[in-house]
């Protein structure tokens, strides 16, 4: 999103999937200790991932996601959360800079419909809301996600 705002001449179309809202995503202070536990508790990390993908049925895939998440540098967790809270591109948006679509699941535990609606309105974007989907629509409803993207790209 930020790249497209800074260099719109280099972006033909923009696809945002469960993006950070245009005015940031602050994490409540009381949630920070739980983030520290993700570094050491595979069980807690797996439960968190499960919460992000409420419709995921493939247990092996969930295990693989947890394994991959544990490979993340633990020192990157807090800085990432801090940056999401500071993120704000509202002042950079002057017009609809490039054709944009936002794909969002209505069961996303991190983002709200109003945040995505505001982001879409600010960017002049189309908002595609997938019912019964969490934070990862491309995993939970792959076929529908692909169809939405192909339609947006013009039948690519």
Image (cartoon, rainbow, N blue to C red):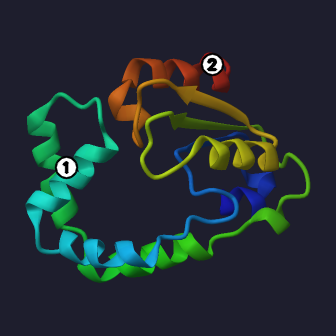
For image coordinates 80% across by 50% down, the residue present is 122
> Is 2 situated above or below 9?
below
Residue 24: quarter of image: bottom right
Query: How much space separates mark 1 and mark 2, taking CA atoms?
Result: 29 Å
Residue 90 x %, y %: 79, 63
Residue 37 x %, y %: 19, 74
Q: Is there a contact, CB below 8 Å, between mark 1 and mark 2?
A: no
Residue 53 x %, y %: 31, 39
Residue 38: quarter of image: bottom left
How many circles with numbers are drawn on the protein? 2
> Is 31 situated above or below 64?
below
Residue 72: quarter of image: bottom left
Q: What element carries label 1?
A: helix
**Observer-nearest of 83 and 54:** 54
Q: Mark 1 points at which residue?
A: 65
Label placed on residue 151? 2
For image coordinates 74% across by 66% down, the residue present is 89
Q: Quadrant of the C terminus?
A: top right
For image coordinates 11% across by 68% down, the residue present is 41
Comparing marks 1 and 2, which lies closer to the viewer? Answer: 1
């Amino acid at each position: 999103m930020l790249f497209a705002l800074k260099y719109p001449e280099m972006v033909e179309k923009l696809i945002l999937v469960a993006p950070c809202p245009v005015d940031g995503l602050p994490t409540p202070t009381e949630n920070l200790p739980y983030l520290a536990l993700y570094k050491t508790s595979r069980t807690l990390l797996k439960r968190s991932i499960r919460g992000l993908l409420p419709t995921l049925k493939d247990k092996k895939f969930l295990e693989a996601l947890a394994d991959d998440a544990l490979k993340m540098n633990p020192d990157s967790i807090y800085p990432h959360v801090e940056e999401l809270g500071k993120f704000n591109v509202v002042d950079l948006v002057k017009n609809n800079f490039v054709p944009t679509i936002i794909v969002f699941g209505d069961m996303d535990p991190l983002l709200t419909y109003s945040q995505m609606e505001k982001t879409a309105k600010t960017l002049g974007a189309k908002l595609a809301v997938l019912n019964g989907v969490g934070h990862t629509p491309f995993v939970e409803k792959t076929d529908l996600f692909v169809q939405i993207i192909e339609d947006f790209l013009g039948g690519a």
